[in-house]
Image (cartoon, rainbow, N blue to C red):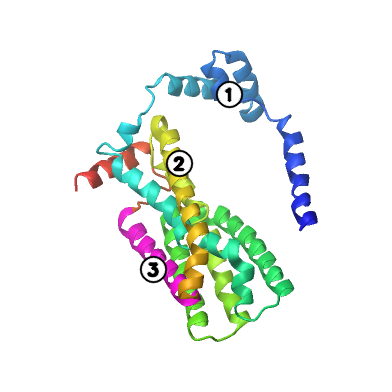
Amino acid sequence: WRLMLGSEAIPALLFLVALFFVPESPRWLAGKNRDQEALGILERINGPAKAAAVLDEVKSTLRQEKGTIKELFAPGLRTAMLVGMFLALFSQITGINAIIYYAPEIFKNVGFGTDSALFQTLIIGIINTIFTFVAIKFIDQVGRRKLLLWGVSGMAICLIGVGIVFHFELNSGPLLLFFILGFIASFASSLGPIPWVIISEIFPTKTRGIAMSFATFTLWIGVVLITQFTPVLLDRFGGAPTFWIFAVNAVILLLFTYFKIPETKGKTLEEIEHYWKGNDHA
């Protein structure tokens, strides 16, 4: 375990070295009236032809009135705020970190040895990475909402399957692995990345930063709940009820997505804001 933990220093050191080559934020420089420095960085990123126009847009945004917390809960945005916090919370309480954190113990409960259980956990990480790239490829082709509906449906089905394996004491490691990998693939291609895309698109620029902060705070509440209570649920009720609770949460999220979350692909901020205003007054 010492080698395992120590190996994580390698990417950390690489990241530290890379930071020396990362330019300062043009937005921050423009906010400090260091326009020439901002323009130079934008020319490197966007090319000389577009840099001046991008800088003008950034400065125009900075001149706008800053958003407030009160605005997020006013008519026109409070439903969007609910959607953002709901997505962040349910990305956790549908069980993703319960599986990732406790995968070795879960696999050992159906007959895998310690080494084999750790190997299955490695497979989970590989599948998670691969299907995140699947989401990146299809998110603009299929649309955020549709991909989220498909993914959460797959999550619910696989969670029910995991519960069945535990309930009937099938002692079937391969079947459990199949359902868990199906869950991971469904999550990584939908509920993992898509909420953050949606949250970044459903708020006006001036309130987006505050909204993202609320969503992140809500997500970490979910992380704490899952981390603390998953072992308690597994010990007190067993695997089947625990994973069926996660499945119920996935079904709730599926219904919420179907009825409350609009498709944001190709929509302007004005169109999305108009949708929220109509929803708040419905």
Q: What residue is disc 1 on?
A: 26
- In this rendering, is residue 222 above or below 275? below
Residue 270 appears in the picture as rendered: yes
User: Mark 1 or mark 3: which comes first in sequence?
Assistant: 1
- In this rendering, is residue 130 above or below 53? below
Residue mark closest to the camera, 1 vs 3: 3
Residue extending farthest to the left is 282
Label 3 packing within 10 angstroms: few (<14), some (14-19), many (20+)? some
Q: What residue is disc 3 on?
A: 248
Amino acid residing under circle 2: Ser
Marks 2 and 1, how far apart at CA:
19 Å
Amino acid residing under circle 3: Val
Residue 266: quarter of image: top left
| Magenta-highlighted residues | 239-260
Label 2 packing within 10 angstroms: few (<14), some (14-19), many (20+)? some
For the image, the number of numbered tags is 3
Is residue 118 toward the left or the right of residue 178 in the image?
right
Q: Residue 30: x percent and y percent?
A: 54, 18
Residue 71: quarter of image: top left
- In this rendering, is residue 267 above or below 172? above
211 or 53: nearer the viewer: 211
Q: What residue is disc 2 on?
A: 200
Q: Residue 108: x percent and y percent?
A: 64, 76
- In this rendering, is residue 4 above or below 153? above
Marks 3 and 2, how far apart at CA:
27 Å
